[in-house]
Image: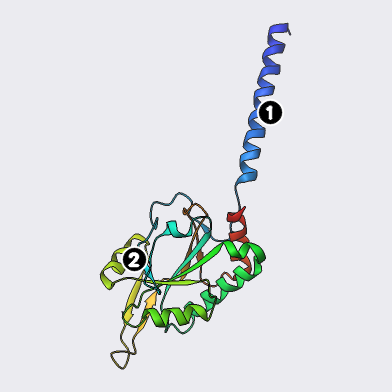
Amino acid sequence: MNKRNTLKLIAAYALLTGAAAIFSACSEKSPSFSAIDLTGADYAKDFALTDYNGQPRTLKDFAGKVVVLFFGYVQCPDVCPTSMAELAEAKRLLGKDGERVQGLFVTVDPARDTPEVLKGYMEAFDPTFLALYTTPEKLSVLAKDYKLYYKKVDGPTPTSYSMDHSAGSYVYDTQGKLRLFTRYGNGAALLAADIKLLLQ
């Protein structure tokens, strides 16, 4: 083997080694989430809603925090309170990092979920959580953008209806980018672990 071929082999080996190192470094930086990874999704990018204090809200208001957004309604018997309780527990599990988590609850029942009702509901889980609402017309548009299903189910009286709705939370990173969808029932520990990855 002549000197030129030897140098070519050495150069090729160096390139391969360098490439392997680069790919290895990339794979190490790719977090492994328990929830569904929606990184790069072209929907649910933002919202324009009002909180129970009457203040207009968008994702930009929570820059620097991981935002966990859930659609539900106050009279929901099981899914909604369980989901909010799990989020509150996940925040507690994160300790000091929990201060960088913002829980948001968007009502799909604005007719009954008044600002006063929403405020009391949030305080039952965590005083830092906010509940948001909008008009029925704007809610319908927002639901399409979030690929959210909800439907009124009549009860025995006009005010005793229930609301069928998608069960899961949208998780945004500290830059306001949609990253995850966590299904109902995943548990507080897995949610806390995913949030911790997003905070790193």
Q: Quadrant of residue 133?
A: bottom left
> What amino acid type should be assigned to the residue bearing mark 1?
Thr
Compared to 44, does 78 lie above or below? below
Q: Nearer the viewer, mark 2 or mark 1?
A: 2
Compared to 148, does 12 lie above or below? above
**Real-space Cα separation, disc 2 to disc 1, in angstroms:** 49 Å
- Residue name at image x 70 percent, y 12 percent: 7
The x and y percentages for residue 9 are 69, 16
The residue that mark 2 highlights is 143
Quadrant (top left/top right/bottom left/bottom right) for the N terminus:
top right
- Residue name at image x 62 percent, y 45 percent: 29
The x and y percentages for residue 114 are 36, 80
- Residue name at image x 38 percent, y 55 percent: 43
Within 10 Å of disc 2 (Cα), the crowding (few <14, some 14-19, many 20+) is: some
Q: Quadrant of residue 192?
A: bottom right
- Residue name at image x 67 percent, y 14 percent: 8
Relative to the observer, which residue lies in front, 130 or 106? 130
Compared to 127, does 171 lie above or below? above
The x and y percentages for residue 45 are 40, 55
**What is the secondary structure assignment of the residue under circle 1?**
helix
Q: Quadrant of residue 20?
A: top right
Looking at the image, residue 180 sits to the left or right of residue 108; the answer is: right
The residue that mark 1 highlights is 17
Q: Mark 2 or mark 1: which comes first in sequence?
A: 1
The x and y percentages for residue 44 are 39, 58
> What amino acid type should be assigned to the residue bearing mark 2?
Ala
Total marks placed:
2
Within 10 Å of disc 1 (Cα), the crowding (few <14, some 14-19, many 20+) is: few
What label sits on residue 139 in the rendered view?
Answer: none
Looking at the image, residue 34 sits to the left or right of residue 143; the answer is: right
